[in-house]
Image (cartoon, helix red, strand yellow):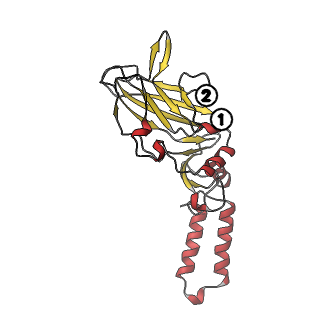
Amino acid sequence: MGYFQLKYYRSVQDENSNSKAALTMFNLLDVLDIKAESEKKPDGSKYFPAKSCKDIQLCHPQSKNGDYWLDPNGGAKLDAFKVYCDFSKNPVETCVKPTTLMEGAEFNKAVTNDFKWVGEDLDAENAQVMYEPRATQWKSLRLDHSHVRQNMTYKCKNSPAYRTVDGGKHTLVKFLASDADEMTAFGKQQRMDVLKDECYVKDGVWRSAVFEIDTTAMDKLPLRDVAVSGGETTDEFYSVEMGPVCFY
C-alpha cells in the first residue's frame, strides 16, 4: 500500500470509526487535504495511479522496484492497469506484461516448410497475444517515452531457430508487430536481435534462444504473435514465452 494511499485509508477509517459527536469539519478537511496531496503526488497505488513509473520516482524517490498501478491517459481511473517499475534502470523502465499465457504450451512441429502462428492455438482474443492496457493507454505510453523494447524466449528441443541455406541464415521464427509488420532476426530493417541461441544443438534436451527488439519506432510494440516454421523431422518440439513490453 502506497504512502498517500495508507494515509488516506487511515483517515477514512478513523472518520468512519469515530462517534457521530466526534465527527467535525476538521476530520473532513484532513481527509480532503490528504486526497488532494495524493492526487498531486500519485504513489502508483490502485487508489492513486500514476502516469508512468518515471513520475512515481520523481514524486517518491525512495520507491522500490515492483508492481504499481498506472493511468497514463488520465481522467477516470477505471482503465488503470498494473505494470512493473524498474527504478534501478536509467532511465526508469515501465514494463507491461502480457495477459495471454504462452509458456507451458508445448508444440510438436509438423514436417513442412509452412509457418504456423502460435496465437491460433491459444485461447486468446483475435488469436493474438493480449495485454491489459486499452488502445488509448498504449497511445499515452508511447507519447510519454522515446524507446521501447520487448523480448521473446523460444524454447526448443531438436528445433533450431534458423537454417543455413546457400551460405545464408534462413529464419525459422518470425514475429507479428503491433503495426502488422512481420519481423525476423535476420531482416534488414526493424529486425529482432539474437541475445542468445542454443537451439542449433539437437540432442533431445530442452534449450532456448532469446530474441529482442529495442526501438524508437513506438508503434511496433507490443508483439502480437509468433510464428514458427515446420520441422525436418518429427522429433522437433518448441514452446514460446513472451516477455514484457518495457518503455523508457
Label total for image: 2
Placement of 43 over or under 219, stated as above or below: below
Q: Amino acid at mark 2?
A: Gln
Q: Amino acid at mark 1?
A: Ala
Pinpoint residue 236: horizontal percent, then vertical percent.
33, 25
In this rendered view, identify the residue nearer to me: 121 or 133: 121
In this rendered view, identify the residue nearer to me: 83 or 86: 83
Pinpoint residue 241: horizontal percent, then vertical percent.
44, 37
- Label whose residue precedes the other's in the sequence (1 or 2): 2
In this rendered view, identify the residue nearer to me: 7 or 133: 133
User: What is the quadrant of residue 217 in the picture?
Assistant: top right
User: What is the quadrant of residue 114 in the picture?
Assistant: top left
Q: Which mark is residue 190?
A: 2
Alpha carbon of mark 1 to alpha carbon of mark 2: how far?
8 Å
Placement of 8 over or under 244, stated as above or below: below
Placement of 232 over or under 33, stated as above or below: above
Name which residue lies at 61% across and 85% down: 23
Q: Is residue 158 left or right of residue 22?
A: left
Looking at the rendered structure, the secondary structure element under dot 1 is loop
Marks 1 & 2, CB-CB < 8 Å contact: yes
Quadrant (top left/top right/bottom left/bottom right) for the C terminus: top right
Name which residue lies at 46% across and 27% down: 173
Q: State the residue position of label 1.
A: 217
Pinpoint residue 161: horizontal percent, then vertical percent.
44, 23
In this rendered view, identify the residue nearer to me: 144 or 124: 124
Q: How many residues crowd around disc 1 within 10 Å: few (fewer than 14), some, or many (20 or more)? A: few
Pinpoint residue 58: horizontal percent, then vertical percent.
68, 51
Name which residue lies at 59% across and 90% down: 21
Name which residue lies at 51% across and 25% down: 194
Q: Is residue 223 left or right of residue 158?
A: right
Residue located farthest toward the bottom when viewing the structure as drawn: 21
Looking at the rendered structure, the secondary structure element under dot 2 is loop
